[in-house]
Image (cartoon, grey):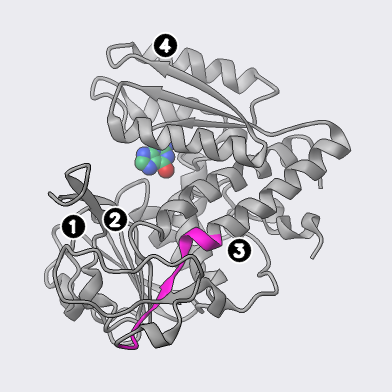
Amino acid sequence: MAASTIFSDCSSSATARLLPFRKIRSSALFFRHSSISLHPTAPSHRKSSSAIVPLAMTTETSAKVIDGKLVSKQIRDEITSEISRMKDAIGVVPGLAVILVGARKDSQTYVRNKKKACEAVGITSYEVHLPEDCTEEEVLKSILGFNKDPSVHGILVQLPLPRHMNEENILNAVCIEKDVDGFHPLNVGRLAMRGREPLFVPCTPKGCIELLHRCGVDIKGKRAVVIGRSNIVGMPAALLLQRQNATVTIVHSYTNNPEEITRQADIVISAAGVANMVRGDWIKPGAVVIDVGINPVDDSESPRGYRLVGDVCYEEACKVASAITPVPGGVGPMTIAMLLSNTLHSAKTLHNFK
Ligand code: GUN
């Protein structure tokens, strides 16, 4: 498949499927895991250098594990070749500006990973790091500078911002043509409306949908439950599923009987931020489970003293679901891949490069 056609969906619609599927078996994007003892916070999926763990190694057949690392690698490879094609043709490389305010460890890690991922595919990254106690005006000044800078095609303000800042004012200041996070109210509003097209869609929910598409999961007509209603994940994930013609329910902290509602879903996207909240008996047999949660839990055996688990109790859910994303290695790598994709798309659009 020619690289130029791989990204063509983006140019007509940010919500259209990112890329036509490559001619690979969707089964290659899964691996099977071996069943291990039930423990709510125990690491569950065995690492494998290959995408598929031979069945002989398994003790129980259960959910396919959706390999986000592998899918994101394919996408990053596609982006790399597209960037090189663009550079050769018009001498332009995409640029992404990241603004980090404060010293949150998690945000620093996310920004560092985004920067590394940019370098790996050939996107130039620009970073502004402002102190926690800087003013909103200083952040706005950085944004306005990047808005005008022709070498910058995407602008990302890492969230959350310090409490004294007005997030709405700051996100409003990013020009929508460079809003690769899809958080500008105009892009969010268009995402919510029928017959309107946002220029960009938030990266994590876009990554969830892309995983479903690339793994051959049909969304149209399915019942979907999104757990969590954050501006960054839950709300846009629900809107995206609806745009794909799913029937969508949002479960949140005030929902009565969340288990019962979740159990009706063919597709579950969980973005609650609560470790192991979604138990096996919340899942309808055969459902597809996308776990966005990245929650630290104490683990004295880990060198760091903690490890990361999802919102979904993996050991239980994998015995009920037909497919499930692991944590880590599921949605996480897809978020960055979508950011790179949005940045490339922005550069192509701004330079009218097909
Ligand atoms: N904080 C957590 N996730 C995100 C994200 O996708 N984009 C930004 N800008 N901040 C975040």
Q: Residue at x 33, y 14 (%)?
A: 131
Q: Does the segment drawn in magenta span residue 68?
A: yes
At numbered mark 4, what does the secondary structure look like: helix, strand or loop?
helix
As measured in the structure, the alpha-carbon distance from the residue carrying label 1 to the one carrying label 4 is 36 Å
Q: Depth check: 100 or 264 in front?
A: 100
Which of marks 4 and 2 precedes in the sequence?
A: 4
Quarter-of-image position of residue 112: top left
* Residue at 17 percent of width and 76 percent of height: 37
Q: Are marks 1 and 2 in contact (CB under 8 Å)?
A: yes
Residue beneath disc 3: 17
Residue of label 2: 293
Q: Is mark 4 within 8 Å of ligand 1?
A: no
Task: Tell me whether circle 3 and circle 1 mark residues in contact (CB < 8 Å).
Answer: no
Q: Amino acid at mark 4?
A: Glu
In the image: residue 51, left or right of residue 94: left
One can see residue 353 in this view: no
Q: Nearer the viewer, residue 195 or 339?
A: 339
The residue indicated by pointer 1 is 275
Q: Which residues are magenta?
A: 60-71
- Label 2: which secondary element: loop
Q: Is 143 placed left or right of 5 in the picture?
A: left
Q: State which image quarter holds ligand 1.
A: top left
* For discs 1 and 4, the disc positioned in front in the rendered view: 1
Q: Amino acid at mark 3?
A: Arg
At x 39% / y 61%, what residue is drawn?
A: 238
Residue 54 position in % (x across, y down):
45, 82
Which is nearer the N-term, disc 1 or disc 4?
4
Cα distance between the residues tagged 1 and 2:
7 Å
Task: Based on the picture, tell me whether residue 80 belongs to the magenta stretch.
Answer: no
Mark sitting on residue 138: 4
Above or below, comparing residue 43 to residue 338 in the picture: below
Q: Give the secondary structure at mark 3.
A: loop
